[in-house]
Amino acid sequence: MARPAEALAKAGAGHYMDIMRSFVTALVVISALLPSSVRGQERCGHPDPEISISVCSGVIQSGRARGRDLAVAHTEPGIAYVALLDYDRALLDFGEAIRVDATFAKAFANRGAVYGAKQDFDKAIDDFTRVLALEPRSAHAFADRASMHRLNGQHDEAIRDYSEAIRLDPAFGEAILNRGITLAGTLRCAEAIPDFTRAIELSEPGTRTGTRNPGPAIALVDRGLCLEKAGRDDLAVQDYSAHLELEPRSQYGLELRGALYFRGRQYDRALTDFAQALIVNPSSPTALYGRGLVKKMTGDARGGDEDVETAKAMRSRVVEQMAERGVKP
């Protein structure tokens, strides 16, 4: 995951990819809306992917479906193959749906999402561009294309698309959060902080959050990273603590807060956070190194040296990585 200082250019990349792991399935599943004539068939689009594939194949082979209905009948097996993680087979079905009906925006969106999962971002961008040609006021299509630009390293294009998605839907929490992540990743933290704050506000009870809002945990930790960069460690530790209230087993949050406590010479608190991070992930060299330095600072030289040497053996650059966080002798 991203780290402060020079590595802040990668801020959010790790947990952004965590979001993207669920992005494809979520997008594909919510994007399939069955016309009434296909819904009338015996469950083409059944929740069980194997049943859906079988029934939809029967619908196609029967010759009864035409036009959009036939395109949807091809789309549903594609969705089922996505659930089975057979992306190549899904691409064939989505492609056939597009061949049958080149105005079916959801088939392009589904195929674009799968291209994204396969890291073929140029093709994904092309498909979401086709979606926008058909549905030019789709906030989700702008946000989805922005995600592909982001993952393709095209940050300016991503920011423009996220901004258009937000213009179309000012309460689109996911787009606001991801624009903030992209801004932070290009060292524009002053612009990113308001986006993170807005994403947090949209997650509060009683607030309309729009769809696919990942909640405040990511926004809190990212805002904390930007506040660190601005020299506001006091506010950053508050954000990391709020993040940990939501995700108590967040290794990332524990290590970030532990580093701040270390820099502030609150060694007891730092030791607790690094030790807790090791409970979550016993193989973390950064948490082990942090615990080792705290031990050395608090008089346990032998135990500290043991942790430090083990951490260095686990990862050769751990000393430099932790120094970037301010955790150094």
Image: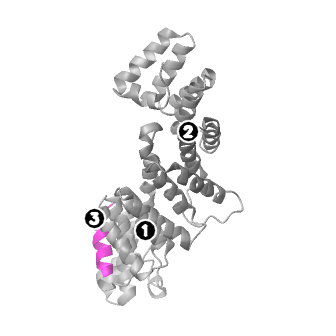
Viewer-side residue, 314 vs 81: 314
- Name the residue furthest right: 206
Element assignment for label 3: helix
Identify which amino acid the numbered label 3 is placed on: Asp
Q: Residue at x 64, y 57 (%)?
A: 203
Label 1 sits on residue: 28
Q: CA distance from mark 3 to mark 2?
A: 43 Å
Q: Residues within 10 Å of mark 3 (few under 14, many from 20)?
A: some
Considering the numbered disc 1 on the image, is that residue within a helix, a strand or a loop? helix
Residue 204 placement, left or right of 187: right
Q: Which residue is mark 3?
A: 88
Q: Residue at x 52, y 55 (%)?
A: 180
Q: Does the segment drawn in magenta span residue 162?
A: no
Q: Residue at x 57, y 71 (%)?
A: 169
Give the numbered dot on residue 228. 2
Look at the image and give the residue range highlighted in magenta. Answer: 86-98
> Mark 1 or mark 2: which comes first in sequence?
1
Residue 168 point in image, percent of width and height:
54, 73
Q: Is residue 177 above or below residue 242?
A: below
Estimate the spatial distance between the alpha carbons at disc 1 and disc 3, rounded to whole Å.
Answer: 14 Å
Under mark 2, the amino acid is Glu
